[in-house]
Image: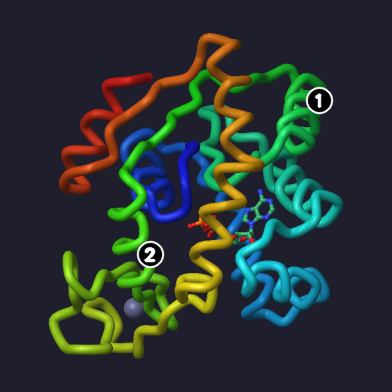
Amino acid sequence: MLGPPGVGKGTQAKMLVQALGLKHIASGELFRRNQTRGTDLGVKAQGYISLGNLVPDEITIAMVLEEVLSEPSKDGFILDGFPRNMVQVESLHQALKDIETNIDCAVLLAVPRDELLKRLTGRRLCTKCQANYHLMSSPPGRSGLCNHCDSPLYQREDDMSIAVNTRLEVYYSETRPIIDYYDSLGCLRQIDGVGAVGEVAYRVSNSC
Ligand code: ADP
Ligand code: ZN
């Protein structure tokens, strides 16, 4: 799943995972899990993430490839948030070659920049079950509390406006070029990410 921060990669990946039984490998979630547990990796990544920068490749690549290679699922997997630059692309393809597999489809979700900013700054997450809310488009039933488990909601530090601007800049400078690479392989599918979650999911599932 490719596309800028806030475009809905995680939401769409979760829908595809349910529909197709794939393994979901989300680099941002792997980092947040490490941060919650207070692991060395989580501590090292914290400063980069809170400022909206990429975590260095030597940390990120090892973390994600371990997940890709640990239980190679026969039905495949969805990568969400990785790769994000050409070094990561090359490491990924080398690792996949070693296990004789490949990327079938690169789904690029597109949404205008002002919509991305609204989505990111209004996003709230459950502290316990990670359920996703939005203050305007999908608010919880009771303000500040999760509909599923009653736990308090929080705002990701990197969804606050300074880090959001950096994340968008980093996306356009470092991640955009990998789109041309997947396009040149002939496996890029560009999807309009504006609309209800179910509508976008329908477009995505018809594209691959
Ligand atoms: P989003 O896609 O909405 O920006 P993620 O949850 O995917 O959010 O990522 C959050 C942060 O984790 C990123 O801003 C970055 O600091 C770090 N991160 C995630 N994936 C990578 C990656 N592939 N390479 C480097 N840093 C990453
Ligand atoms: Zn919850």
Q: Quadrant of residue 115?
A: bottom left
Query: Please, what is the three-letter code of the amino acid marked with disc 2?
Result: Leu
- Please state which amino acid type lies under the numbered disc 1: Gln
SS label for mark 2: helix
Look at the numbered disc 1 and give the secondary structure of its residue.
helix
Mark 2, mark 1: which one is toward the viewer? 2
Residue 94 x %, y %: 81, 25
Residue drawn 57% across the image and 47% down it: 171
Tag 2–tag 1 contact (CB < 8 Å): no
Name the mark on residue 94.
Answer: 1
Q: Residue at x 31, y 44 (%)?
A: 112
Q: Which disc is residue 161 wearing?
A: none
Q: CA distance from mark 2 to mark 1?
A: 33 Å
Image side of residue 140 versus residue 55, left or right? left
Where does residue 60 sit, x and y in percent of width and height? 75, 53
Pick whichever, 207 or 190, lies toward us: 190
Q: Residue at x 41, y 71 (%)?
A: 130
Q: Nearer the viewer, residue 142 or 37?
A: 142
Which quadrant of the picture is home to ligand 1? bottom right
Above or below for 191 versus 111: above
In this view, the residue in front, 108 or 98, is: 108
Find out if the beta carbon at label 2 lies less than 8 Å from the nearest ligand 1 atom: yes
Q: Residue 74: where, in percent of width, then height?
A: 57, 28
Whether residue 29 sits left or right of residue 71 in the image: it is: left
Please tell me which residue is depicted at 36% across the width and 37% down the height of the picture.
110
Looking at the image, residue 1 lies above or below residue 81: above
Say which mark, if any, is on residue 120: 2
Quarter of the picture containing the C terminus is top left
Q: Which comes before the other along the chain, label 2 or label 1? A: 1
